[in-house]
Amino acid sequence: MIRKIYDEELVNGQCYQNLHYLCKNIGPRLSGSANAQKAIEWGKKLMESYGFDHVFLQEVMVPHWTRGQKEQGVIIDGNARIPVAIAALGMSVSTPVDGITADVIEVHSLKELDTLGEAAIKGKIVFFNRPFDPRFIETLRAYGTAGDQRFAGPAAAAKYGAAGVIVRSLTETLDNYPHTGATGYKKDGLNIPAAAISTMGANQLSSLLKQDKNHKLKFYFKQNCRLLPDTLSYNVVAELKGTENPNKFITVGGHLDSWDLAEGAHDDGTGIMQSVEVLRILKTMGYRPKNTIRAVFFINEENGDKGGLKYAELAAQNKEEHIAAIETDLGGFTPRGFGFEGVSDATLQNINKQWQKLFEPYGSGQLVAGGGGSDIGPLKAKSKSVVLIGYLPDSQRYFDVHHSANDVFENVNKRELELGAASMAALIYLIDQHGLN
Ligand SMILES: [Zn+2]
């Protein structure tokens, strides 16, 4: 059966061409945008075209943030005006219309900010410049540890009276593209404008600061992003109905929304196109699942998680029992395996004993502890028994493109994408047949 799943995908796979349509005919699709709505309508039509048992939308209110005009960032070093590439962080407020010019203070951690205190920070632009730690083999771990600068840095700097924040892009690669991503303000805090700076820009700013013995250097930036009223949006859901347990669910999903700097190819066009492909493979093969199998396009993962929260809320309300939920949101790269959250050590050992050899020939035999994902995470709070599974592709190239202008279709490999879809279809088949305990 698993061999047949891979054969179907590698010979007749459609996720690559679907991804092409999503990227090139729709493109960026941040929550609340017209493009997000276009993608929702197209996604629903695509699911209907495959003749799945049930296709429907779940209503959910989402934030609507817009970037506005292209940002400007300039290092002012004496008479020199050196432009650098920046992009407003998602959910950031704008600068005043004329921008901000201020002294820069470079820091490497939130803790350092606390040590410096208000006297050193007030009125300045705080420049968070801690790079990815290259020693992590899984790049997601490096992202996780550097990420606090972007998620929490602006709010922390605001507390000490900073005028604005510039954050080194969360990527290992050295290039001239800013990588955006959401920042979280404190509800009761002062909101100050925050932007990501390219890694090359960050290195340049840092080295000029080191030479700036007389503290003359200043930074100028200007952005005019806005947070508009919340907008009605949707998760898109397709089902193959269970023949034995129609009210037990195995879900596979990714997120439909994407940042506005590119096409959201790897983040997360690949994930949603793989999810619908899983259902297509199983249906095309004439497989009748015991449990209901769902593909979900979650909305608003990037700047609010409202889609994931709504999905869990409705699952609880409708008394749906979720056996497992798989999230694919780490790029469409070569599959390596799966991470399991919510299983005992003994169960994980058993999964490895029974299934590792089945995935090994296809290169996705890493069945490890830890997994989940932000869209399926909320299911855990509503259901104790659900197993959350993170699809684990090779992680080395993801952060080269993540949240930047380089996240385009051309950077996705057809076979890598298809192997991922097949590996998820295989896992779902095994869970459907044998359960997870
Ligand atoms: Zn994502």
Image (cartoon, helix red, strand yellow):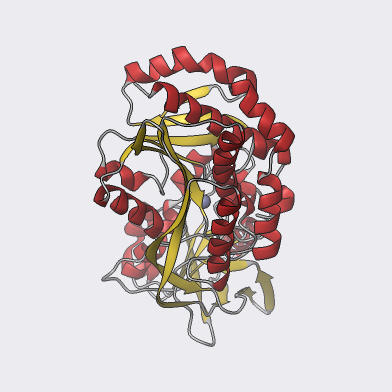
Place of residue 119 in the rendered image (x, y in percent of width and height, measured from the top left): 34, 69
Question: Could one spot residue 394 in this view of the protein?
Answer: no
Quadrant in which the C terminus is drawn: top left
Residue at 54% across / 43% down in the picture?
275
Question: Could one spot residue 379 in this view of the protein?
Answer: yes
Depth order, front residue of 381/143? 381
Depth order, front residue of 7/383? 7
Whether residue 252 is situated above or below residue 345 in the rendered picture: below
Place of residue 433 in the rendered image (x, y in percent of width and height, measured from the top left): 44, 23
Residue at 64% across / 48% down in the picture?
400
Quadrant in which the N terminus is drawn: top right
Residue at 44% across / 62% down in the picture?
234
Location of residue 98 by image quarter: bottom right
Residue 32 appears left or right of 39:
left
Whether residue 95 is situated above or below residue 347 in the rendered picture: below
Depth order, front residue of 408/75? 408
Whether residue 69 is situated above or below residue 418 in the rendered picture: below
Residue at 58% across / 58% down in the picture?
45
Place of residue 421 in the rendered image (x, y in percent of width and height, measured from the top left): 60, 37
Place of residue 34 in the rendered image (x, y in percent of width and height, measured from the top left): 55, 73
Residue 222 appears left or right of 65:
right
Check the image and name the residue furthest to the top: 353
Residue 81 appears left or right of 375:
right
Whether residue 124 is situated above or below residue 167 in the rendered picture: below
